[in-house]
Image (cartoon, grey):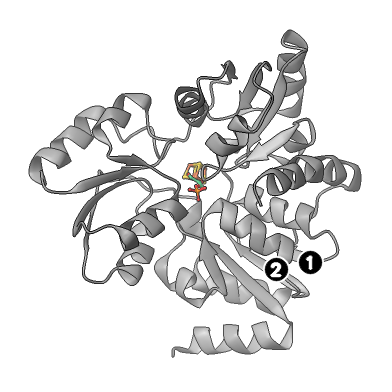
Amino acid sequence: MNNIAEKINKLRKEKNAVILAHNYVPGDVQDIADFAGDSLGLSKQAAETDADLIVFCGVHFMAETASILSPEKTVLIPDRTAGCPMADMITAEQLKAFKEEHPQALVVCYVNSTAEVKALSDYCCTSGNAVELVKALPADKEIIFVPDKNLGAFVRERTGRNIILWPGYCPTHVVITLDKLQTVKSQHPDAVVLAHPECPPATWPEADFLLSTGQMLGHAEQSEAKKFIIATEPGIIHALKKRCPDKEFIEACETICPNMKKLTLEKLLWSLERDEYEVKVEKEVAQKASRALMRMLEVLP
Ligand code: 13P
Ligand code: SF4
């Protein structure tokens, strides 16, 4: 084990810390984490852990979610500039105005949103449970879905529900175009295509399955197929190769989430050494945001 890893392990023990990492962060950080997974798995871990300290190797809204679900714990993010541009595509003021335009609608926010937006929402969801969550809501209700127009359209397609979209999107996924996906498919006609629902709707008919990153891992493991094209941030390929060493995984096209790549092993050590950077949500906002998150975990435990 290298020197940095040894220091991280020593400090994690001394501080009774748990290290959580998203499937898109660098592979060595995923490997050292106590739990690496998708947004849904990470929310559950954050809600259930009995550690004193959570070090969150993911983007800011994920650390915020951990702090909302475990307000008595200290939550650190190793790089405070690691944000999610999609989460910043709707502000609380914009959501308030949008709600006034549709006063009867229920508000479902993707977990990729700020705490202030969650506080104004009725339910939270992740890419792994959005369809099931919306299916569980009263059938006669209109639903405002923020901020991702692509995940929202995917939920609308799968549920047939009346969904009002906000025009947010993920800059990392929208570059996975139909043209690029068709090109890589023509080079690997025998591969199964797993795509994230944040990809543009035009690409969906080319995908065999539309899945969250956690669902991609489960699917690849259980499938008899040996070769997959992966249409999402390529950090997941590290986890896929670990889980399925005898299978082949091909990137749909070159794209990365620059923010997720900011969470390096060096910064994780810095964070543990100095207890930086703490992520805390203002109490009133946290209490309201917690309602939307807890409803998600109650409807779909
Ligand atoms: P998952 O919920 O699939 O982990 O995705 C999170 C995310 O940020 C996708 O861009
Ligand atoms: Fe946000 Fe997209 Fe990065 Fe996911 S991949 S964290 S949605 S910018």
**Side of 163 relative to 65 (left or right):** left
What residue sits right under mark 2 in the picture? 54
Front residue of 151 and 262: 151
Q: Is residue 287 above or below residue 145?
A: below
Q: Is residue 31 above or below residue 203?
A: below
Residue at x 60%, y 41% (from the top left corner) = 112
| Position of residue 284 in the picture relative to residue 93 (left or right) | right
Q: Is residue 227 placed above or below 288 in the rendered structure? A: below
Circle 2 SS class: strand
> Does 143 sit left or right of 263 as displayed?
right
Label 1: element kind:
strand
Query: Is residue 218 placed above or below 175 in the rendered structure?
Result: below
Q: Amino acid at mark 2?
A: Ile
In primary-sequence order, the first of circles 2 and 1 is: 2
* Nearer the observer, 14 or 49: 49
Crowd band around label 2 with a 10 angstrom C-alpha radius: few (<14), some (14–19), many (20+): many
Real-space CA distance between mark 2 and mark 1, rounded to the nearest whole angstrom = 6 Å
* Quadrant hosting residue 52: bottom right
Q: Are marks 2 and 1 in contact (CB under 8 Å)?
A: yes
Query: Label for residue 301?
Result: none
Say what amino acid the circle numbered 1 marks. Answer: Thr
Specify few, some or many for label 1: CA neighbours under 10 Å numbering under 14, 14-19, or 20 or more. Answer: some
| Residue at x-position 53% and y-position 30% | 148
Location of residue 222 in the rendering, given as x and y in whole percent from the top left corner: 33, 60
| Residue 20 coordinates in the image, percent (x, y) | 59, 66
Look at 49% across and 89% down and name the residue there: 3
Residue 80 visible? The answer is no
- In the image, residue 72 lies at what x, y percent? 86, 64
Q: Which mark is residue 74?
A: 1
Q: Answer with the quarter of the image where residue 103 lies.
A: top right
The image quadrant that residue 105 belongs to is top right
